[in-house]
Amino acid sequence: MKDGVNGVALAVFIFFFLAVTVMGFLAARWRKAENEHSLDEWGLGGRSFGTWITWFLLGGDLYTAYTFVAVPAAIYAAGAAGFFAVPYTILVYPLIFTFLPRLWSVSHKHGYVTTSDFVRGRFGSKGLSLAVALTGILATMPYIALQLVGIQAVLDVMGVGGGENTNWFIKDLPLLIAFGVLAAYTYSSGLRAPALIAFVKDTLIYIVIAVAIIYIPIKLGGFDDIFAKAGDAFSQTNPATGAPRGALTPPEAGQWTYATLALGSALALFMYPHSITATLSSKSREVIRRNTTILPLYSLMLGLLALLGFMAIAAGIKVQNGQLAIPQLFETMFPDWFAGVAFAAIGIGALVPAAIMSIAAANLFTRNIYKDFIKPDATPAQETKVSKLVSLLVKVGALVFVLTMDKTVAINFQLLGGIWILQTFPALVGGLFTRWFHRWALLAGWAVGMVYGTVAAYGVASPTQKHFGGSSKEIPGIGEIGYIGLTAFVLNVVVTVVLTFVLKAVKAPDGIDETKPEDYTADAGDPGVQVELPPATAGTSH
Amino acid sequence: MSQPPQVSRGPVVTPMRVVIAVCLIAPFIAMLWVGSYAKTDPAFIGIPFFYWYQMAWVLISTALTMIAFKLWQRDQRARSAAKGGASE
């Protein structure tokens, strides 16, 4: 790390940050609808986003700053095992191609804002819907915290995070400011703010990656040299484990882990409330399907980005905290001003998902806890007010989390969050295709998956941690090491199927299904489909 | 719902739908069979096989999803035409 503050980089960073702040506040006026006090308006941007805005929004949402820091960091630390993010994002799209359009249709037909809304409507069970809502909120909170961790990493490398010996307030002040700005414009502009800022974020990220992937290998002597040096580094024995640090290809024993992590994560991604929020804000079924064909562009970017982890090794970057590897690589390799652009890309890359995630968590709370359990007769204006407040609370919670607890706690919870959220898959995706599952069986399956996943993850030790040391463990009955989330998911499905048979046999009361088969294929323009189509503006080349 | 009784919705499994399913399932088989690509050779511009192969699959799966999307649109259009009323 260079001594002191990197002035030029910091100036560029602040410039971009101010620019998006102004955009964030102006966003409220962008494609404005008549009724700004409804939750649809604030929380789903009026459900009016076309193909390109949805693409930017989803991209900004799914490929977060943390992803950009963590994926290369994982490669930097262990090599091939960290690359599972690429097959994971490849598998996501064929998967959502099959079920998301159905969710869009039924949600627009019945005015569902969250996945829990759908589960309640489909299975007539407030208990199941509460389980889905709580899981969503729990899984999202640490995710928001990790976005702040991503900003912190950038600030640290620029030298404004302060050393160990600076006063805590000075140290955390930049983060507090970034956070305050984020909170303020989300509060005032809702989903429109991140949608607009996502344009800036993605443009910056694409530029940075294009430059990094050409410029850095040239400086380092080509990919041959980079991988040769990385291979040497990985074959060194790690004193903590007595095993090699990593490998360029997964060893025989690691292949199950690799495949189950990719599959489990792919199944889980669109269970996260923020992915669904971005999906439901699109204006038609076709927008979603079309997006599954253009979103993989981001996966390509992610793959290139992952290679930066190898470059960090080849460039001789040595950091204790792996999260700092990539920001440090940028600072070492790039001229100061371009390092500033790269840091701005990561920083803004954290703001977009943090905003969407807090909106998604707030929607869940308002619709499925506040309205269902606390105040059933809440008016739309009250709903929006509660949502705005909760989105603020969620962010404050994440901030407190990051400032008071060790970073590893946030990462542990994020890992658990992935395992948890996957347990809502049977109720949601199962429910989209069939009404055969019994609601109580789904609830029981969910509970079994949650408990098994949590206990199993608690029991994983690593050289540095006694608990939550990783996300994979031996799969009972198979004996290979696999992703805990996927094992829990299989258990969940088995319990659900068996109990459904039992409950049907004893004729347990089935809930009322308010949806009809044709609701799942309805599109914009069909009778009863709620979609407002404001006049198209720039960016909607739909 | 309101379709004339004499027009059937057509068979659920058609050759076109089989092709769509194959397009959507292929990436799963390719990516989950890690043993088929866990090697370093042949390298491409110095990048080991393991890495460039998976990145190539980003493009292949994109092409497959796009084909599935186009076929699905055609399938839906054919069906709504058969129903006697275009819903587009």
Image (cartoon, rainbow, N blue to C red):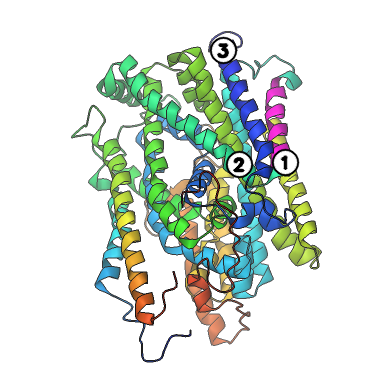
Q: Which mark is residue A8?
A: 3
Categorize mark 2 by other alpha carbons within 10 Å: few (<14), some (14-19), many (20+).
many
> Between residues A241 and A101, which one lies in front from this camera angle?
A101
Question: Is label 2 in a helix, a strand or a loop?
Answer: helix
Label 1 is placed on what type of residue?
A: Gly
> Residue B75: x and y, percent?
33, 70
Q: Is residue B41 left or right of residue A511?
A: left
* Chain ID, mark 3: A
> Between residues A166 and B55, which one lies in front from this camera angle?
B55
Q: Is residue A401 visible?
A: no
CA gap between label 1 and label 3 equals 33 Å
> Residue A486: x and y, percent?
45, 55
Determine which residue is flagged by label 1. Answer: A397
Question: Is label 3 in a helix, a strand or a loop?
Answer: helix
Label 2 is placed on what type of residue?
A: Pro
Q: Which mark is residue A194?
A: 2
